[in-house]
Image (cartoon, rainbow, N blue to C red):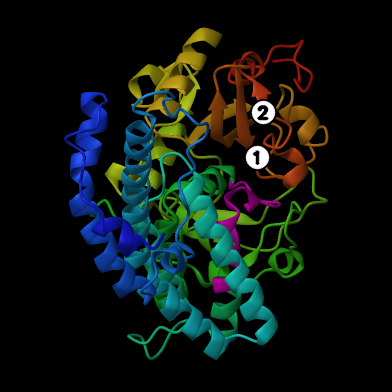
Amino acid sequence: MRFEEYLAKPDNSRERQGSAEQAALCNDITDMERNALKHRKDTCGSTSHETARQHLPRLQIVGDDRPTGNGGDRGSSQLDKIRLAQDLKFSQETIRREEIIKTDRDNLKKVADHKLSPEQTKRFETYMAKFEMRAAGQTPQMKPEEIARTYREVAKLIDPKDNPNPVLAERDRIKLAELVMYHVANPTSVAQGFHNTCSAASTESRLYAKYPAEAAQLVTEVATTGKFTPKDGSPKISIDKSVLEQDNEARRAQPGKPLRDYASQVFQGTAMALVRNGYYQSEPKLFRNPPDTGERYRDDSGGEIRVDWPTPREVHRMQRKIAGEDKSEPIIENHYLRDDAGTLPLLKDGQTHVSNVQELRTKLSELKTQGRLPAQMLVHTAHEPFFGDSGGGEAGGSGGWHFVTVMDYDDRIGKAKIDNFWGKRADHIEDGGIPVSDLYKATTIPTKNSRGSKGK
C-alpha cells in the first residue's frame, strides 16, 4: 500500500483498544505523518514513501505481538500504527540530522574533489563515511552540529578562503586534512611516538572520539595562522615552527604503527605549548643514556629545560584551553599520589581520585552511565599490562607515569577498554579491555615487587 493511501483511510483510533501509552502514540500520528510527508519531498525529492525510506534507516520492531481471536484485526491495525509512529519519529530525527550535516558534508566533498587526487578523494570520503557511522552508533549519539562543524574545520584547512597567506603550503595542509579525517574516523589511531607527549596524545584521542571539531579546529588554526587561541580566555600563543615542520618520524608514520604522524605532531606540540611555555622540538637522540626526545621549553628566566610530564592538574587545564570548560573532564588518578613537588596531596588538585578497586569501578560506571566517557587516566608503566606493552620500558614516554584514555567500560565483566599511544598492539580495545583490578593497581606507586620497578 502506498503511504498516501494509508493516510486516506479513516481514523478508527477511538474504536481501538490498548494502553494509554499506545493510544497517545496513535493520536500523535497525524501530525507526525504530515511532517514526515513534508520532509520527504524536501529532503528526498520523492513522491513515494518507499522511495523516500531508501534514504532513511528503518526502525526494526522484533517479534509479533498481535492479538488473536475476536478483535484481532483491530489489534493488528493498532500495532501497525504504533510501529509507524515509532518509525516516523525515528525517521524525522534522521532527517533533521541530515539537514544539519548535508551542506557542510557536500562542501567538504567539493573542496576535496577540487584539491585532492582521485585516490586521495576516495580515501577521504571513506573516512567521512566511517566517521558518520561511528558518530551515529556511539552512546550518546554525537550531535549533528559537531559533525557539521568538524567538516567545516577540515574544509577550511584544505582551502582557507579567509586567509590568503596561510603559514603552511597547500600540500602540507592537504596531508594534515587527510590525517585529521583519518583520526576523526579512527580516534584510537593516535600515537605519541618517541616523545614525552602521552598527556597531549590522551587529550587528542579523547577529543577525536567525543569532540572532533575541537581537535580539527586546533590543527586548522595552527596550520593556517601559526597561532592558537585558548578557549579559557588566556592570551593567544605563537607555535614554534619546529611543531609545524614535519619531522622525520612523521614522514615515516603509517596507520597502526607506533610512529607519530604529522597531524598528531601539530596537535600534541600545540597542546604541550599550552602548559609548557615556548615548547619546541628537535630530532630525538634515542641512543643517548638516558635517551633525549629533543623536546624543550623555556622557564621564566628564558632558560631551556627538557620537557617533563605535565601533572594531572595541568593536563586538565590543557583540555580546558583546547575545548573549553564544558568539554573538559577531570583526570582519574590514585588518591594516594602527590603532585610533582611532592608536597600537596592530589586530593586538592581538583581531579577524580580513587583509593580502591571498587571506587574505580563505581567511577567508571558513573562516567559510562552519564555519557562522559572517554576519560583520561594516570597509570604507572612499571605495572602490567603497560610494562609488557612498552616492550619492557622501550616505548616512547614509558618507564614512569603515563596518561592513557579510557574509551569504554563494561560493568558486567568489570573491564575497561584502554587507548594507549604506543601503536595498535598496545591498545586494549579489541581484546575486550583490562580488568578493573589490574587497572587500579596500575594507578599505584610501584613497589620493588612491581615488574618494571627499579626498586622504589
User: Does the magenta segment cover residue 180?
Assistant: yes
Q: Position of residue 81 (x, y in %)?
A: 32, 43
User: Does the magenta segment cover residue 307?
Assistant: no
Q: Position of residue 419 (x, y in %)?
A: 62, 39
Q: Is residue 169 left or right of residue 317?
A: right
Question: What stretch of residues is rendered in magenta?
Answer: 177-197
Of labels 2 and 1, the one closer to you: 2
Quadrant of residue 80 within the rendered picture: top left
Secondary element under disc 2, as helix, strand or loop, is loop
Density class for disc 1 (Cα within 10 Å; few <14, some 14-19, many ≥20) is many
Q: What's the residue type where badge 1 is placed?
A: Asn
Q: Is residue 56 left or right of residue 445?
A: left
Density class for disc 2 (Cα within 10 Å; few <14, some 14-19, many ≥20) is many
Q: What's the residue type where badge 2 is placed?
A: Gly
Q: Nearer the viewer, residue 280 or 84?
A: 84
Q: Nearer the viewer, residue 344 or 421?
A: 421
Reading the image, the residue beneath label 2 is 433
